[in-house]
Every structure is written in C-alpha cells, then in structure tokens.
Amino acid sequence: QVRLVQSGGGSVQPGGSLRLSCTASGTNFRLVTMDWYRQAPGKQRDWVTRITNNGSTNYADSVKGRFTASRDVPRAVAYLHMNSLKPDDTAVYYCKTRWRSTDFWGQGAQVTVSS
C-alpha cells in the first residue's frame, strides 16, 4: 500500500517561508511524479506544482517565482519550499502521487499566513 506522510505546516507572517515535506513508502519513488495541491476553506482544490520522476517542475502562476518543488530520491521525500508567503497562500496543502493507476494523497498540512 502506498502511503504519503506530510510534515512541515505551521503559521508564518507575510513574507516568511516554510518547507513542507512528503515522505513516500510502498512505491518506487524514482518512477513517480509528485503533485502538490492546496485547498482554502470554502474553495476548490487548486493544483500548485508538479515534480516528475525526471526532476522537471511546473508551477501554477499564483506561486511561480515563490515556491520551489524538489525531491530527495534516496530518502523518498518530496519537498515544497514556500517563500515570500502571502495571506492568500493560507490553505491545507496536500501531496499526491499515482501508482498503478491509483491516486494516493497525503494527510494534508495546514499553512496559515497572517499578521
């Protein structure tokens, strides 16, 4: 069974930084793509970024230039580095991967950006 375990959420002031982690088990981490999504209260879930098995990345326009996706393949950990955070970044952040045609989601990490 594939499991994604997240950590690194918290509260930060505008302009601050956080790093989220997503540790995978039950899959060949070298072969999968990891997506990050976020969902604010009362809003739809939005795609944030993707890092492929080849290490290439794509970003939503709302976070481009501020967020960076990376990965530590030997440790099977995906990271989301979040810089210059804004109040609109406040949301629950989820990592997601697909293995054998099934999507697997992390439990979510709350990120709160406020003064």
Image: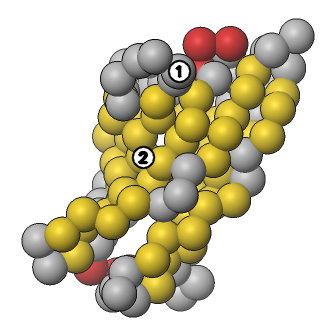
Which residue appears at 36% of the width and 51% of the height?
Answer: 35
Q: Position of residue 57 (x, y in %)?
A: 35, 48
Residue for point 53% across, 21% down: 41
Residue hosting label 2: 36
13 shown above or below 73: above
The quadrant holding residue 68 is top right
Indicate the position of residue 1 as horizontal and vertical percent values. Answer: 35, 87
Whether residue 81 is visible here, answered yes or no, is yes
Query: In the picture shown, does residue 81 fall above or below 90?
Result: below
- The answer to which image quadrant residue 113 occupies is top right
Is 51 left, or right, of 17 in this rendering?
A: left
Image quarter (top left, top right, bottom left or bottom right) of the C terminus: top right
Left or right: 61, with 100 as reference point: right
Dot 1 alpha-carbon crowd within 10 angstroms: few under 14, some 14 to 19, many 20 or more: few
Percent position of residue 103, x then y: 24, 63
In the figure, residue 30 lies in which quadrant? bottom left
Query: What's the amino acid at mark 2?
Result: Trp
First along the sequence among labels 1 and 2 = 2
Q: Which residue is mark 1?
A: 41
